Image (spheres, rainbow, N blue to C red):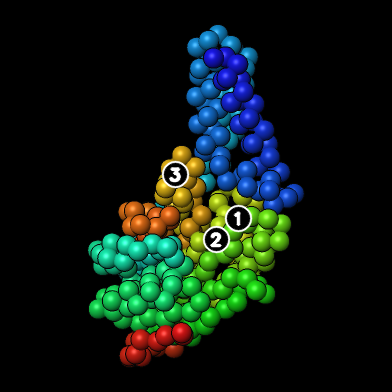
Amino acid sequence: MARSLKLIVALAAIAGTCGSLGHLAWWLELFAHFRPQYALCLAAAGIGLLALRQWAVGVAALVLAAANAMPLLHYYPAMQVPPADSGPVIKALLANVYFGNGHHDEVLDYVRGARPDVAVFLEVTPGWSEALQQLAESLPYQAYAGEIFVASRKPLRGLRALPLAPAGAMAVSFSFETAAGPIEVIGAHANWPLGAAIAASRNRELATLATISRETAGPVVLLGDLNTTAFSPVFSLLLAHTGLADCAMGHGYHPTWPTWFPPLSVQIDHCLAGRGLTVLDFSTGPYVGSDHYPIEVTLQLPTGAAGGQDLTASRAPPTFLR
């Protein structure tokens, strides 16, 4: 038993060390995403070793467990939410529906019940696009570009389909009006970082998203399956280069993928919010047949936070890019 526990400690320690070197190679970054799993394995093994009177290795395992758990403080800081002012509150929803998912009705019922003001759907096939158009009674303004479907209660202004990298992924951006002025929404799906070339493409895609975010005037929200976690150096660079904040910070750890194997679940679906936005709530939605859980974010704009032209009289019809 002691030998098996020591092996677990050794493997988890090696994996954690590889994750710490994630900035050096794409395959090392993959190890960075599973800090909670390493912490749990090390803590369990450490307690077991202490029970077996293996004091030195047991204590070392618990120290390593604490070191791997430290990044989770990203989700549990002692934060004080600023007092609510009279600014408008909006609810945003992101759902990677999974192209092979046939549970159309479950997704539609969930979205109707969640009552978002704006929603971004990823991995949308033509069949999924047809199904999502049934949300028009509550989200009448819709667009479909590539694999991204967006829907809003308000008209989609300045709608753009944006390639993120040559032969890579794409994003969709638009703004919609609130009582405090327009807010910009960016929906994106980055590539899997499996292999040196694809990982490099993912990094270029995130760099392009950073540029788009920086060039956006006024409040901005980025909703996307970014195929990285908050424990990765790539994610830290994205926050630094965009100036955006992780909406999940201070609202607990909410793994989103894969739904089919919870022991290895990590959060790769994100909402990043720009300056002037207060995150009131962040949570995941239920299982709706996809390999991803959806995320829901409630945001508040301060009064007068956004400028720009008055679009409240606009009644543009639903728009489809494809």
Residue at horizontal 59 percent and vertical 11 percent from the top? 54
Q: Which is more toward the observer, 190 or 275?
A: 190
Name the element at disc 1.
helix
Residue beneath label 2, please? 226
Type of amino acid under label 1 = Phe
Can you give x and y, in whole percent of width and height, for residue 91 in the image? Answer: 35, 66
Residue beneath label 3, please? 261
Marks 3 and 2 sit apart, C-alpha to C-alpha, by 19 Å
Q: Are marks 2 and 1 in contact (CB under 8 Å)?
A: yes
Displayed quadrant of residue 140:
bottom left
Type of amino acid under label 3 = Phe
Is residue 145 among the parts visible in the rendering? Answer: yes
Depicted 245 relative to depicted 305: above or below: above
Residue 100 lies left or right of residue 88; in this view the side is: right
Residue at horizontal 56 percent and vertical 42 percent from the top? 34
Residue at horizontal 62 percent and vertical 60 percent from the top? 238
Displayed quadrant of residue 176:
bottom left
Can you give x and y, in whole percent of width and height, for residue 94 in the image? Answer: 41, 64
Residue at horizontal 67 percent and vertical 59 percent from the top? 199
Type of amino acid under label 2 = Leu
Residue beneath label 1, please? 235
For the residue carrying disc 1, how many other residues have a C-alpha within 10 Å: few (<14), some (14-19), or many (20+)? some
Depicted 15 relative to depicted 141: above or below: above
Marks 1 and 3 sit apart, C-alpha to C-alpha, by 23 Å
In the picture, which quadrant includes the N terminus? top right
| Viewer-nearest of discs 3 and 2 | 3
